[in-house]
Image (cartoon, rainbow, N blue to C red):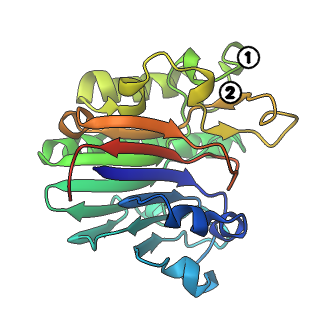
Amino acid sequence: MLRIISLNLNGIRSACNKNLLPWIAVQQADVVCLQELKAQIPDLSPEMRAPAGLHAYYHPAEKKGYSGVGLWCRRQPDRVVEGIGNAEFDAEGRYLRADFGSLSVISLYLPSGSSSPERQEAKFRFMEVFWPHLAALFAEGREVVICGDWNIAHQAIDLKNWRSNQKNSGFLPEEREWIGKLFAEQGWVDVYRRLEPTATDACYTWWSNRGQAWANNVGWRIDYHIATPGIAALARQAAVYKDTRFSDHAPLIVDYEYAI
C-alpha cells in the first residue's frame, strides 16, 4: 500500500511547534507533500530539515517567509524536479516533483487570489501557464499524483457557504470551470471525490481563522490529490485528519494499492 499525505503547513516551523513531526513519525507515509513552508532551508532545525527515516526535499520561495513547497519521502526518489519552467512562479516555490520508477508525486501550491486583485491576476496567470504543463505531464504516460493546496473549491458541496462565496477568490466561476476542465477535458481524476462522491462536512480541508469557522466547521475543500486515471483507480481510502491541528489546513491522507 502506498500512503501519500498532503498538508499546507502555514509555516513549517509553526506546524512543527504543534507536534507535526511526532504525528508524521507514526503515519507510515511513503510521501508527504508540504505546502506553504514560509521558510528557507537555513531557517530549519536539523529535525525539520531531515525528519527521521525520510528523505527531504524543498523548493522555498525566494521571498523570505512566503510560500514554498517540500516533499518528505520514505524511499529516495530517482529524480527530483523543481518548478515548472516559469520564472515568475518558480521564484515563489510552488512545484516540486519526485519520480519513483513510473510514478511521479508532486507537491503543488497554487496561488491564492484572496489578498488583492493583483494576486488574483497572478493566480489567473498561473492557471494559464500551468494548463499546458498539466497536459504535457499527462501525456508523459506515467502515473502521476499532484497533491496540494489548489486554492479552488470545485463544487457547491466543497464548501459550507457556497452561495455567499460565488464572487470570492477560490470559488469564482472561472476558477471552478478551469479545475472542472482538468477532469473533463484533460482526463485527470479528483481522487477524494472518486472515493467520497457525496461527502460534504467531512471533506473540508481549510478553515478561515476569522470568527468561529473551525469550531462551526465552516470549511472549504481546497486541498486535493489529483491523479492520472490508472493510479486514481487504485485509491482505496481517503481521509481528512482533524484530531490535531497543525495549521489552518488539515492533512489529506490517501492510500493507494500501489508499490514504489
**Mark 2 vs mark 1: in front:** 1
Tell me the tag on residue 164: 1
- Residue extending farthest to the front is 26
Quick check: 77 left or right of 174? left
Quarter where residue 95 is shown = bottom left
Location of residue 55 in the rendering, given as x and y in whole percent from the top left corner = 38, 76
Tell me if mark 1 has few (under 14), some (14-19) or many (20+) residues whose alpha carbon lies within 10 angstroms of its own.
few
Which quarter of the rendering shows the C terminus?
Answer: bottom left
Whether tag 2 and tag 1 are in contact, CB under 8 A, the answer is yes
Q: Residue at x 30, y 39 (%)?
A: 227
Quarter where residue 102 is shown = bottom left
Q: Residue at x 57, y 41 (%)?
A: 121
Quick check: 46 left or right of 137? right
Quick check: 37 left or right of 99? right
Q: Residue at x 56, y 81 (%)?
A: 47
Amino acid residing under circle 2: Asn
Question: Where 124 falls versus 28 (above or below)?
Answer: above
Tell me if mark 2 has few (under 14), some (14-19) or many (20+) residues whose alpha carbon lies within 10 angstroms of its own.
few
Q: Secondary structure at mark 1?
A: helix
- Residue extending farthest to the top is 163
Question: Where 236 falls versus 110 (above or below)?
Answer: above
Q: Secondary structure at mark 2?
A: loop
Location of mark 2 (residue): 168
Question: Where 91 falls versus 200 (above or below)?
Answer: below
Location of residue 132 in the rendering, given as x and y in whole percent from the top left corner = 27, 42
Location of residue 9 in the rendering, given as x and y in whole percent from the top left corner = 62, 58
Gap in angstroms between the C-alphas marked 2 and 1: 8 Å
